[in-house]
Amino acid sequence: MQTYPSKYGHALEIGHLIGGEEIFEGSLLERRNPADVADLVARFPQGSKETLRKAAQVAQKAFQEWSRTPAPVRGGVLANLAQVLLREKSTLVRLMVREVGKTFKEAGGDVQEAIDTAIFFASEGRRLYGQTVPSEMKNKELFTFRRPLGVVGMITAGNFPIAVPSWKLIPAVLAGNTVVWKPSEDASALAYLFVKLFEEAGLPPGVINLVHGGGKNATGQWLVELMDEGLLQKFAFTGSTAVGRWIGEVAGRNLLRPTLELGGKNPLVVLRDADLELAVEGAWWSAFATGGQRCTSAGNIIVEAPIYEAFKKRFLERTEATVVGNPIEHPTGLTYGPFMNQRLFERWLEHYTWGREDGATLLFGQGRITAANPYPRFKGDPEVGLFGWPTVWEARPGMRQFEQEIFGPTINLVRVEGLDEAIQVANAHPYGLSSAVYTNRRDWAYRFKNEIKAGMTSINNSTVGAEAHLPFGGVRASGNGARESGIWVIEEYTYWQAVNEEYSGRLQLAQMDTGYAQPKAPTDWARVLGDSS
Ligand code: UN1
């Protein structure tokens, strides 16, 4: 690594990390602070297919030793990692604010989620339980063991640049796998630092290998294609549904079960008896936390008619109080910062056209924040990054902005008549990641919880902010049913080996030599009891 002075700290020139060595292969890409383009954050090479192959071979070799390392010892590395991450938390947070434009508070949450995950899985090394199972034969025992899969290919998004990779890397290595990781090109410096901190924690070289680069027609795509060369035994991906479908196809033809955490269009329902202030606060945070750039961000706020106007008024007041700006210069008080990248900004800008064409009503917001289009509660220079007005619409099912994930600061209010319509509208989109309902009626919450199609449901809480030890994931277009976090993710990084051991010294045939009791001739109990009816 080399460092150069930059506007808000050093610019890092970083390589791939393969087998504990830093390798510069490929033309250099750069990452600038999305809140201020004058701040160069990192330069990194774009990995080629050859670089990736080398990384996969190194990972394959490291697997021999790492998979044989006792699980409690592997867990010990994660206990160290939790300490190292805690020690470096403020450094990681500041780099995250510079590299992806999160607020300090949210960056702190992101790093904390990785610390929590490391703590959880450190002790999992002392469990990683299998079972003892009774045999149908005498003198025979049955067992199950969890075994690691091998080399895992990983691609992660930039919006949770430490937390989401930690959900994959930590359980994968705890279970004894090794990894080739291609992080988002929006977060290469954080990925580099994260891998370095794993090394400091005592992870042997080659267990996690980092290869930088872009996605489409680039490093990410080529990593997926390594499945066709038999170099990967598992793939884990967080990103768009379109890319996830393709990864699923490649994995499928190689008989691999991928982990696919994809998009969302998460509904938040407010029923007529809800605590209005609580619902407004939760809806506002679900819409605008991280500038809407979370897969758990709310997509539609569905409000029952009797409270619709009151909710709308309070929600618009809350939205007007949203503070947007350059987070590195304004460490407190901001709701959100810039768009992470140009692509997300353009998609968000396009939805204004969708809204106009599809007949939605714009209640608040007017596109990009610039000097000529100032937003009253903006802090910083809006010209040096891509910043968006918090945007609120009235929309209906069937409109593009109702159905499609936008990943920016925008939200739809949707008016419904009653609980039945609320649930129907809440399901009227292709996704199924997160969901929320605000009500104090337990029977209404019960119905919502049962009838909503989503992997995650909040009752009287926002759609975002899942805790690090509950299963995270979705149904329908939000994923393939794989779950991350907590004990559930272990299924994704292990296979079950069933073992039987025979002590009889004979070949006992299951099913055929089993000493099942034979039923006797039946007694006519009704006749014995004199029951003639
Ligand atoms: C994501 O946006 O990919 O539940 C993950 C949440 C965070 C994680 C979001 N803990 O909102």
Image (tube, rainbow, N blue to C red):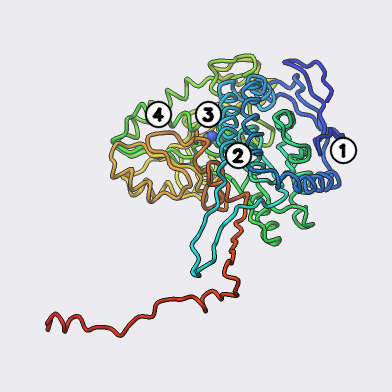
- Answer with mark 3 or mark 1, whichever residue precedes in sequence: 1
Q: Nearer the viewer, residue 250 or 37?
A: 250
Q: Nearer the viewer, residue 58 or 393?
A: 58
- Of the four image quadrants, the one with ligand 1 is top right
- Answer with mark 3 or mark 2, whichever residue precedes in sequence: 2
What amino acid is found at the position of numbered circle 4 in the picture? Answer: Val
The percent coordinates of residue 151 (x first, y second) are 73, 49
Label 2 or label 1, whichever lies nearer to me, is 2
Q: Is residue 275 left or right of residue 232?
A: left
Q: Which residue is mark 4?
A: 280
**Residue at position x 53%, y 19% in the image:** 323
Element marked by disc 3 = helix
**Residue at position x 49%, y 37% in the image:** 298
What amino acid is found at the position of numbered circle 3 in the picture? Answer: Ala
The picture quadrant where one finds residue 268 is: top left
The percent coordinates of residue 196 (x first, y second) are 74, 29
What amino acid is found at the position of numbered circle 2 in the picture? Answer: Trp
- Answer with mark 4 or mark 1, whichever residue precedes in sequence: 1
Q: Nearer the viewer, residue 311 or 53?
A: 53
Element marked by disc 4 = helix
- Residue 167 numbered mark, or none: 2
Q: Which residue is mark 1?
A: 26
Mark 2 surroundings: few (<14), some (14-19) or many (≥20) residues within 10 A: many
Q: CA distance from mark 3 to mark 2?
A: 21 Å
Where, quadrant-wise, is the N terminus in this rendering? top right
Label 3 or label 2, whichever lies nearer to me, is 2
> Is the C-beta separation of discs 2 and 1 under 8 Å?
no
Mark 1 surroundings: few (<14), some (14-19) or many (≥20) residues within 10 A: some
Q: Which residue is mark 3?
A: 289
